Image (cartoon, grey):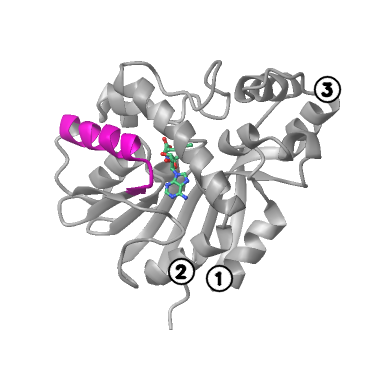
Amino acid sequence: MKDRQTQKSVRERYAGAAREVLQGKPARCCSGKKDPISIELYDQAQSRDLPEAALLASLGCGNPTALAELGEGETVLDLGSGGGVDVLLSAKRVGPRGKACGLDMTDDMLELARANQARAGATNVEFLQGEIESIPLPDESVDVIISNCVINLSADKDAVFRECFRVIKPGGRLAIADIVTKAPLPPEITSEIDFWTGCVSGALVESDYIFRLHAAGFESASIEPVRTYSAEEAQALLASKSSTARTISADAAAQVAHNLYSGFVRATKPLP
Ligand SMILES: C[S@@+](CC[C@H](N)C(=O)[O-])C[C@H]1O[C@@H](n2cnc3c(N)ncnc32)[C@H](O)[C@@H]1O
């Protein structure tokens, strides 16, 4: 029940973000400025290749397509594809013999992603409606799963990892950008739903992330830190994500700055 309520709050937040972009504004998952983990994720070469509207819709915390080794002809699935930026970049990398699919539960995000697909003229792309805890694809049908700042939002991460393992082909891989924490965050942060929907308090502790991936059947799981927050950035970030306008203590902000980071998570599904 609590999981359903969390998912409903996540969906509402991102439906709102998508509607803002559909009205021509840049994507923000919260009030205030774009947070420091989300800015300048794509280099000039990648940006040149994309419709501006797709870039404006980006709400990620990394660039999984830059770090994942995508090959010609591969099938890529992006979990929580949002406005579609990583799906469109993947589609270019896998070429006409390959395919890039995006999966998202939020209808307004799917509308935005399909509009961006049309702008980009991408034909080897498909956006699917559904939840990452129950992926609407057959077993062993995908070479690579990417995702950008989404797994932290799930209230049932073990279900996500089980589903990833099911749909990836043997020898296939996970290449995920996500928010991770070195240690549990303080109750002042974990007790507020806005910090969950704003990609802060749903972050897994790094050792737990690795443990759960291995428990789902993956091997060689690792996390590479990509971006961190300064104390001032953490304070500003938390203030911008909360809708209650309450003051976050300097101690809680310092703990967030010390522990929270954006990381690149890799894992592989063993060959039989
Ligand atoms: C922070 S945004 C990231 C969007 C995109 N990956 C990007 O980099 O711009 C999170 C996205 O994940 C989607 N999402 C969150 N939880 C989901 C779930 N359980 N199943 C499917 N989609 C989900 C939201 O609808 C939203 O589009």
Q: Secondary structure at mark 2?
A: helix
Say if residue 65 shows up in the picture: yes
Check disc 3 and report the residue beneath it.
250
Check disc 2 and report the residue beneath it.
165
In the image, what residue type sits under mark 3? Ala
In the image, what residue type sits under mark 1? Ala
Check disc 1 and report the residue beneath it.
216
Gap in Å between the C-alphas at discs 1 and 2? 7 Å
- Is 85 displayed left or right of 243 in the figure? left
Q: Secondary structure at mark 1?
A: loop
* Residue depicted at 64% across the width and 36% down the height: 193
Q: Secondary structure at mark 3?
A: helix
How far from the left and from the top, in percent, is residue 145?
A: 40, 56
What's the magenta region?
Answer: 103-119
How many residues crowd around disc 3 within 10 Å: few (fewer than 14), some, or many (20 or more)? few
* Residue depicted at 31% across the width and 50% down the height: 129
How far from the left and from the top, in percent, is residue 71?
A: 30, 56
* Residue depicted at 64% across the width and 45% down the height: 203
Q: Are marks 1 and 2 in contact (CB under 8 Å)?
A: yes
200 lies above or below 68: above
Gap in Å between the C-alphas at discs 2 and 3? 40 Å
